[in-house]
Amino acid sequence: MGVMPLSTEDRVLVLGASGYVGHRLVLELVRKKIKLRLMIRDLADIPRAVPREGDVEVVRGDALEMVGLERALQGIHTAYYLIHGVDTKSFVRRRVADEKDTQAAANFNRAAEPTGLQRIIYLGASGQDGSELSDQGNNGSSVAAILASGRAPVTSLWASMIVGAGAASFEMLRGLAERLPVMGYPKWIDASIRPIAIDDVMAYLLQCLFRPETAGRSFEIGGPEVLSYRDMVQQYAEVRKLPARLIVRRPFGASRAEGVPPAASGAAPSVAEGLTPEDEVRPKGIEEVIPVELTPFKKAVALALAAENNGSESGES
């Protein structure tokens, strides 16, 4: 049975609305006049997560306990699954967090089974751990697989690095580029990835909602350039008008970068685990379905810094 197109009367559920991506997505959906329901675990997040305008319902719930899940899913056409259980600053707890993420996905499937949910749109991290995305590295693949085992078809979007002020992997890049003019890096400094601007991530997430043909498919999303971490550090420095950074590759397969600021200390080792110089950047494929004018990396950095200065970029990773 095919997916029914979204109508003006249909309601969309966002799980993870108070997170870095989720909060921005909610604002974009409200601008598109989409009827929304948000499931929020912590009442303290409600003032931040819920815009004052638009048709927005709020359900208090916790996917780990199934509290509120059944109520949140009633009458929902599409669910954006953006929840996560990993604190990027506490990777010693990764195994427990992974178990929580997979349990949350299983609970979601169980609660969705008796409903008329048409589809799920999922955003995951590709190629590296510790990013700003909903799940981390291989664990994200596990969560996507669990969601895909349910009745509703899943659209999975995979991004390697989101460029936006407040995004964990971007903050790590910023911390390294700002901190030292000379840096020692492990071997992942030359890994190739496709960083993507937060605005382009929003464009893909929104367009998937209106494109039923994306249901049941998995896509890599990324910017127009394939860049190494070395490239990104230098280009960031150029945007900030900093002196050129001297990057020295450390021997013996070291996994930690020197000079990592405290705010990025959680993201650094996880990126090291996920990236290798031999990594191949897989084709995106999504451009065949959703054409987006992608933002070059340097422009994305400039936009992130400008938005932060204007107070429009804020949020959790």
Image (cartoon, rainbow, N blue to C red):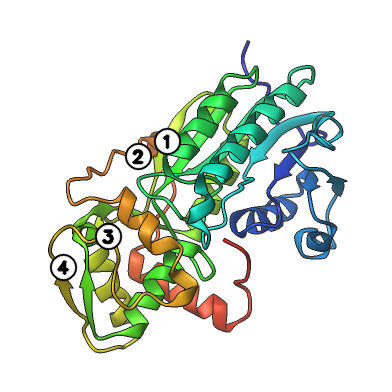
Residue assigned mark 2: 284
How much space separates mark 1 and mark 2, taking CA atoms?
6 Å
Between disc 1 and disc 4, the foreground one is 4
Q: Residues within 10 Å of mark 2 (few under 14, many from 20)?
A: some
* Comes first in the chain, label 3 or label 2: 3
Q: What kind of element bears circle 2?
A: loop
How much space separates mark 4 and mark 2, taking CA atoms?
32 Å
Q: Nearer the viewer, residue 304 or 248?
A: 248
Quarter of the C terminus within the rendering: bottom right
Quarter of the N terminus within the rendering: top right
How much space separates mark 3 and mark 1, taking CA atoms?
29 Å
What numbered label is drawn on residue 250?
4
Numbered label tally: 4
Name the amino acid, label 3: Ser
What numbered label is drawn on residue 219?
1
* Comes first in the chain, label 4 or label 3: 4
Q: Residues within 10 Å of mark 3 (few under 14, many from 20)?
A: some
Residue assigned mark 3: 255
Between disc 4 and disc 2, the foreground one is 4
Residue 234 appears in the rendering: yes
* Comes first in the chain, label 1 or label 2: 1
* Comes first in the chain, label 1 or label 4: 1
Q: Nearer the viewer, residue 238 or 104?
A: 104
Q: Is residue 11 above or below residue 163?
A: above
Name the amino acid, label 1: Phe
Identify the residue shown where x is 56% and y is 83%. Answer: 309
Name the side, left or right, on which 264 lies relative to 215.
Answer: left
Name the amino acid, label 2: Lys
